Amino acid sequence: MDLFPIVAGRFKLDGGAMFGVVPKSIWQRTNPADENNLIDLCARCLLIESSDRLILVDTGMGDKQSERFFNYYKPWGGDNLVDSVIGASFHPNDVTDVLLTHLHFDHCGGCFTWNADRTSFVPVFPNADYWSNESHWQWATQPNPREKASFLKDNLNPIQESGRLRFIEKGKDNPLGLDLLFVDGHTEKQMLPMVDWKGEKLVFMGDLIPTVGHIPLPYVMGYDVRPLQTLVEKSAFLDLAAENNYLLFLEHDPNTPLVRVHQTEKGIRLQSCHQWNEFI
């Protein structure tokens, strides 16, 4: 098995929303804000190559939405999903499966794009199946008012209409051959893959721990629908990560793709930051 980081784009979000009740004077030490209180973020996906599959975990925002929509999220940098896949020496046609940690727009928007005359949507990965789970799919397609703006019909309808939507059932073996951690604090049944790679246990953190600044236990996003549940899930996971020296893959940190954590007198804290080239 081999792994490749894929940068689907970079964007900005409100720092206060990203850190919930944590004061700005504290969170801006790790995630400095601009004059509009926005912090830099990355849509960092993961390509997993096994003997018979090429699995892409998440797809970023994509490019289907209006200029007004993207003005809210201030895209920056030159990275995009397709170029990053090609830069990893693959073609979009090679992707066999797209595993979606959850269906918020910044995680699934890149599955489909406009056709040449912008009259309909076409798959970016025409040979891929799209993997979610039934509980989260129902949650996303019948959204609560708090999350409704994050579950976009232009992202979800094409997946369903493609006929290639597949569900993974919690607690049962899945055809992708990946261990999955299910967490419910950020949204219902977020799925985080755990991969054995180069003697390491690498965990794709999704929105459980989106950036380096979110490692301390109380640093929970204002976007989470069940913040107290996130605290429980983070605590249990971070204990395991520190005890077993897991390598954590950060989806949204703008600068740091990989970290380790350790136990300190103040609780679990960052132990070390790593770049991808340290492991290849």
Image: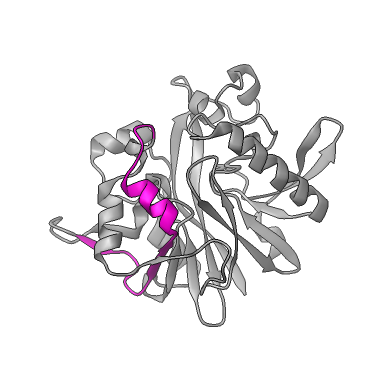
Q: Quarter holding the C terminus? A: bottom right
The answer to whether residue 15 is left or right of residue 203 is left
Residue 61 seen from this side: no
**Is 79 included in the stretch rendered in magenta?**
no
- In the rendering, at what x and y percent does residue 20 appear? 55, 25
Residue at the image position 80 percent from the left and 34 percent from the top: 267
Relative depth, front residue between 280 and 198: 198
- In the rendering, at what x and y percent does residue 72 appear? 34, 32
Occupied quadrant, residue 122: bottom left
The answer to whether residue 137 is left or right of residue 195 is left
Residue at the image position 50 percent from the left and 77 percent from the top: 53
Where 79 sits versus 22, above or below? below
Residue 225 seen from this side: yes
Residue sticking out furthest to the bottom: 51
Where 227 sits versus 37, above or below? below
Q: Which stretch is magenta?
A: 121-146
Relative depth, front residue between 115 and 134: 134
The answer to whether residue 62 is left or right of residue 253 is left
Occupied quadrant, residue 5: bottom right
Residue sticking out furthest to the right: 265
The answer to whether residue 26 is left or right of residue 167 is right
**Is 140 included in the stretch rendered in magenta?**
yes
- In the rendering, at what x and y percent does residue 137 appear? 38, 54
